[in-house]
Amino acid sequence: MPRAAKTPSLGTDEAIANLRLAVHGKAANFYAMYSSVMGGIVTDPALMVLPLDDHMVHRGHAVFDTAILANGMLYQLDQHLERFLRSAEMAHIPLPFPQEQLRQIILDTAATSGRRDGSVRYWLSAGPGGFGLAPTECIGSSFYVMIFAGLIYPESLYTQGMKVVTSTVPIKAPFFARVKSTNYLPNVMVVLEAKECGADNGIFIDQSGMVGESSNMNVAFVTKDRGLRHPPFDSILSGITVQRILHLARRLVEKGDLKDIVVTDVSVEQGRAAAEMLLIGSSIKVAPVVQWDDQPIGDGRPGPIARKLLDLWHEDVRAASDQLVRVPYGEV
């Protein structure tokens, strides 16, 4: 065998130069990052890195959440932050700063990015300190914030609808489903499986044969008699977006577009028999599903309730003052 090339040993200047050379084209969508390890905000993608000994990296002992930046406002920031803190408590990760300071760091990072539209994702980790299991080795929890472009779905997904499959990936146990941790391997595998089947996403089914959730989206149905149905939240993640959508859907009940809204178990058979099937989440908003395991949902076309709920969401982002937090541009 030919002798392998010697692995270079880099000095500090060479390492930083190579980090800049390693910045890929997609990093143009990374606008600003806060790191409690560095103690501030950076806008150079080459510096948007984590210590390898952070327990988020090698043990997945971390939680995260995401809010939407729209028209210079953060939509439902406080609701997402409250869920973030609940996840941190369940994962036994102490806060490095008081809640109000965490909130201000998120706002300041968004302001530093200069972007008026995008996504804001933030993580809380047990922190750096070693490569063992126990977080007692960690020197203190770490907090990170990233402002990035976010996921953009093609318009055809809303006008033509999505295809899903029943996933063979086991659904997370209820406790771990309710903690929004960085352990997303099952979620990734659901999407991979769906893509291999020529579909857009997959549906987790629980041990009782009831509909759970999708990869990173909630699942709702409209019955043929115009009832909106959603699975209970005791064994799945309580989506901030779907909770808001269920609230906004009351307007459709008042107008007579929907008969009622009920959170209840939904069997696979009931789901397949629905007039409409919806995937709901902060990135996808409200998207219609037109095919499940090669069988059409309803008449196989996007239904009217999906569009009405999506329109209500867009209106909410523009005008719901109680859901919007101003980003302090020019004040940092």
Image (tube, rainbow, N blue to C red):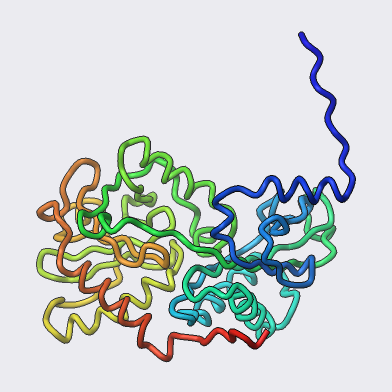
Residue toward you, 25 or 242: 25
**Is residue 92 visible from the viewing direction of this image?**
no
Residue at the top extreme?
Answer: 1
**Number of numbered callouts drawn:** 0
Q: Residue at the spot x=25%, y=51% of the render?
A: 268
Q: Position of residue 228 (x, y in %)?
A: 22, 70
Q: Residue at the spot x=78%, y=49% of the render?
A: 17
Side of 43 relative to 260 (left or right): right
Q: Position of residue 171 (x, y in %)?
A: 44, 50
**Is residue 283 visible from the viewing direction of this image?**
yes
Side of 28 relative to 56 (left or right): left
Side of 214 relative to 123 (left or right): left
Q: Residue at the spot x=15%, y=76% of the render?
A: 258
- Seen in the picture, residue 57 relative to 260 is either above or below; the reply is above
User: Which quarter of the rendered picture does the N terminus lie within?
Assistant: top right
Residue toward you, 4 or 160: 4
Q: Residue at the spot x=80%, y=51% of the render?
A: 16
Side of 238 relative to 267 (left or right): right
Q: Position of residue 106 (x, y in %)?
A: 62, 77
- When asked about the image quadrant of residue 278, the answer is bottom left
Residue toward you, 307 or 247: 307
